[in-house]
Amino acid sequence: MVNITRLERVIEKTRDIVENSREELYQLGETARIDYERTKHELALTRNDISDTIREVDALELDYDKSRVYLMDVSRNFDKYDEEQIKNAYDQAHQKQLQLLSKREKEKMLRLHRDYLERNLKTLEITIQRSEELISNIGMALKILCNDLENASVQIGEMQQMQALGISVIMAQEEERKRVAREIHDGPAQSLANIVMRAEFCLKVMEMNPSLLEDELYSLMDLVRKSLQDVRKIIFDLRPMSLDDLGLVPALKRYIEQYITDYGIFVEITIMGQEYELASSLVIAIFRVIQESMTNVRKYANATEIVIKIEYLPKKINVVVRDNGQGFEIDKVTKEKNGMAFGIVGMRERIQLLRGKFEIKSTIGQGTEVILSVPSTTMDNVDGGRR
């Protein structure tokens, strides 16, 4: 059987891991976003530097062309210029050439750096977009994961409850079979064996002393009558025929009379409202819950008095079964796997199947109260021609 507490710890741990992963991914995305803004700013500065360098290169090219033209003029007309002027013309042309080469190299390096920044900026943009998508996907996955795991936990809990209920049903069936077998063995079976023996004795009396036959036959009739009563009691416990023939209240009153006779516990029943016919499933459920409550009182409560109240309302039936017994701790008993716990689970399940409400109130030393309320217009109220 699955441990719900362990499953909840696994759910919590899984949620923490996914949330931490989302936080780390968010930090990576923020870092990428900061790098993106820095790279974007650096790219803008680099583009401005390239523009400035291009203008400087263009200006240097004009100056260099002018210096070359002047140098060519000086070279063709040595006689017009002195040695100092010729030297200055060569130096100026050479200096302009070096400046132009330097600026062209700078322009080339700036263009390479610009291309690198543009590629890096594109990569960072893709990283940011991807991180946002992953964060969104992880958020959705976390929500789905948590919902699915929590639903799984709930479903497993419900399955365990259903399993416990199934076990309780099986145990109740086995206990009922044992009880019926024991009652049949101790009652009708013994009586029938005795009847057979008395019948054989009557045959012998008839042969030997017919005058004694009448008394023996009367004794035999009393024995048959008692056996018939035992059989009817067993049948009533299994399924009171008066439930189908007379309805809920008459069957309950007959059960209460027998209960008082058998166990000596005083039972008072009060009917409020106008009694009306109910669906067969509703009658059986209410009767069995009251019967189970009274059985628990007999077995566990040490009570001397039971009060039953049934209230007929236009759209629902309210029932209260109260005793003056020793009471019990509800949470403790429902966690235990014993007859009383299974009985409570069975009663609650019966009422819930009818879309009703079921509650138990108990205080140590002050008795127990079983309260139920079921709608009288259930879906299967059409069966048997009932209301």
Image: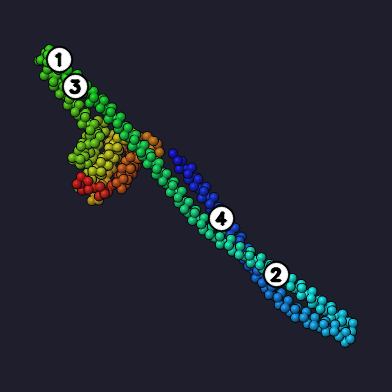
Q: How many badges with numbers are in the image? A: 4
Q: Which residue is mark 3?
A: 195
Q: CA distance from mark 4 to mark 2?
A: 38 Å
| Numbered disc in front, either 4 or 2 | 2
Q: Please tell me which of labels 1 and 3 falls first in the chain.
A: 3
- Determine if residue 23 is in view: yes
Residue drawn at x 44%, y 47% is 152
- In percent of width and height, residue 121 lies at 62, 65
Q: Is residue 271 above or below residue 133?
A: above
Closest to the observer: 200 or 4?
A: 200
- In percent of width and height, residue 374 lies at 28, 47
Closest to the observer: 349 or 148?
A: 148
Residue drawn at x 47%, y 44% is 7
Q: Which residue is mark 2?
A: 110
* Rendering colour mode: rainbow
The local secondary structure at tag 2 comes to helix
Q: Which residue is mark 1?
A: 204
Q: Which residue is mark 4?
A: 23
| Numbered disc in front, either 2 or 3 | 2
Q: CA distance from mark 4 to mark 3?
A: 86 Å
The image quadrant that residue 159 belongs to is top left
Query: Do callouts 4 and 1 mark residues in contact (Cβ within 8 Å)?
Result: no
Q: Is residue 356 above or below residue 170?
A: below
Residue drawn at x 16%, y 19% is 199
